Image (spheres, helix red, strand yellow):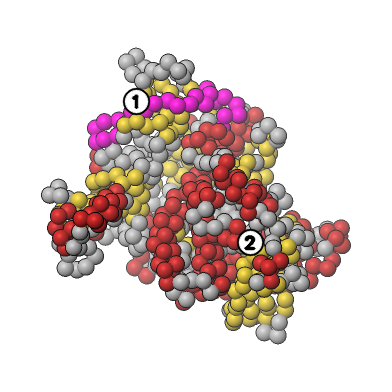
Amino acid sequence: MRQASYRPLSYNELKEALEVNEEEELRFTKVLGRLEKEGEIVKTRKNKYGLPEMMNLTRGVIRLNQRGYGILAPDEAGQAEIFIYGRNLNGAMHNDRVLVRAQERAHDEQRPEGEVVRVITRANNQLVGTFQRGKNMFQVIPDDARQIYPIMVKPQKKIKVNHGDRVVVAITSWPEKFVNPEGRIVEVLGKKGQPGLELQVVIKKHALREHFPDGVIEEANAVAKEPAEEEIARRKDFRGLRMVTIDGEDAKDLDDAVSIERTEQGYRLGVHIADVSHYVREDSKLDKEAFARGTSVYLIDKVLPMLPPELSNGICSLNPQVDRLAVSCMMDIDLQGKVTSYDLYKSVIHIDERMTYTAVNKILDGSDAEVMKRYRDLIEDFKLMKELADILRDERNNRGALDFDFPEAKVIVNDDGFPVDIVRFERGPAEMLIEDFMIKANEVVSEHLYWQEMPCLYRVHEKPEDDAIGKLNMVLGVFGHKINAKKIEPHVLQKLLQEVKGSPEEQLISLLVLRSMKHARYLPQPLGHFGLASKYYSHFTSPIRRYPDLAVHRVLSLLLEGNMTARKRAALEKKMGMYAENSSVQEVKAEEAERELVDIKKAQYMEQFIGDVFTARISSVLSFGFFVELDNTVEGLVHISSIYDDYYVFNERNYTLTGNHSGRKFSMGDEVQVQLVKVNVPDARIDFELVR
């Protein structure tokens, strides 16, 4: 069908063209049905089969906005996103995989518009929402505002549900153009606002897998054995090489270790990654469960790991003072940060110390004599690591890499899961050096597999869309800046960020540049990583907690062991597209769940301060008011209706609100005094008012 001469053919015509005999017909029918179900081919109204791209159809995942429209992220690399009005959704729901017929774009700087012609696969069979009892109908309003359809339900005798209850509803009938979906309540979680409900709501809402099936646990116990002597003998022995892990205090899944030596030309950096692929065999129960999860999810004080604890915290984790199997990337790096040579090994390692970021930061700044004494044999190693990390970061900056340094926070909870503090988190030298080393190892492995022409899963960050740069330019023009949308490269945006550094508009422009970016995703093609200004980039360094890393390890291991046959290579190439799609979807799901729970806990923490006055900075300005951020990173809304002294007009070119009569102006970065007036914990909404 991909041949240029192909024209749409019927079932019988295809069968004849492919010379399918009677014995092969059943298999042929199944293959044809599967391809159509997956959206690889399309059957026309005249019952002819063709490729979507030949029929002006684009396949991808649609993401809805609470305002009722959708944006299609195409599966095909390099294709533009497509805007879909609510009237053209035709029953598609948030995160569904769909086929969209594109229409002509209005003008150059806008996305093309389109219409959903078919839903290929539904993203959610169940949703979490609030039960509402009306006079003549019952419905569930989904918690996620992007699930724009209310779900109609019927009363049930077996499950008692009251107005306002948070429930899990299974969808029994999907929405159509003018028809809402129908469903059946399968679980009552509790009353909206009920304490302690948040974690379970987030898990259910995002369809996260909380428990491992018995078969997976049994398999984990069976493979979680100490390395056998014959396996160790087959590997490069690095047990005599001094190396450490550097992680957060509460980390239990330690999948990367580092070693360092000075050489005549510069440095020899070793990045040693847990050999998870040795324990998690392809198509095993462990592998299928890891694929379904895609990633570990970190929900404040609860982890939903990708692999059972027997592996993630046990035999795969690079714990100190025990032998562990690893894949090692040994790099010789010169004084300019260039990798002059490298070697990749299946290895056995022995970690000398389990270090924390806190301890390494204290060693590097010399602030704690006791810590310096405790790790005196490693001090020179850490200084050498910092020296090399600075060189690697400079090299990355010189090629145009973008580094957004927005504040992060950690919510501290007690044993009952109640938030007791919010701590602003700043990256120190230790966090940055590990990041620098992992990026370099990822680049080396990715480029190695590319030139070996191996199937690979690449971490891709595509260029911003023209319309996103057009919107950015509207604001930049107000401040005397402009970027060329046709020649957009990482160094162009890097130069812009450097130019505005220290200016009043720095925060606004940095935020808008970030918003103009596409979300990074996984693809089988090496389209490069725009944010890192990297031509070849893959995820290799976290196979305990990310499935793409495990997939990369599997390919690399077969290559290093000399077991990559043509048949195996072809089989892996076929799987990479599926791995990429699922991993990208699961990553977004995990990020949204993690962010949502943090926001809920922040709201829960702030409830105790209702009525208090705070000094805050305006973090964003919108037509209906502005958001302010406190020192602890908590954000809340000052609604325009609560500002009584004037009538304020929103300027979308420079993101300001200006009083009609007074000329008083509110801009991003302004310091204001606000009073906390309202907190809605379930919806993670915090409302402030200005203090005159």
* Quadrant where the N terminus is found in the figure: bottom left
Query: Mark on residue 10?
Result: none
Which numbered disc flags the more N-terminal residue, 2 or 1? 1
Question: Which portion, as a residue range, is magenta?
Answer: 175-198
Position of 96 with respect to 451 (left or right) is: left
Instruction: List the residue tagged with mark 2.
Output: 274
Q: Position of residue 414 (x, y in %)?
A: 70, 35
From the image, tell me which residue sits under label 1. Answer: 152
Residue at x-position 62% and y-position 67%: 327
**Picture residue at 65% right of the left edge, 29% below the top:** 608
Residue 566 horizontal/vertical position (percent): 42, 72
* Magenta-span inclusion, residue 190: yes
Residue toward you, 133 or 84? 133
Instruction: Report how many numbered discs are placed on residues in the image.
Output: 2
Graded by Cα atoms within 10 Å as few (under 14), some (14 to 19) or many (20 or more), the crowding at tag 1 reads many
Q: Is residue 4 visible?
A: yes
Above or below, 20 against 445 in this view is: above
Q: Amino acid at mark 2?
A: Ala
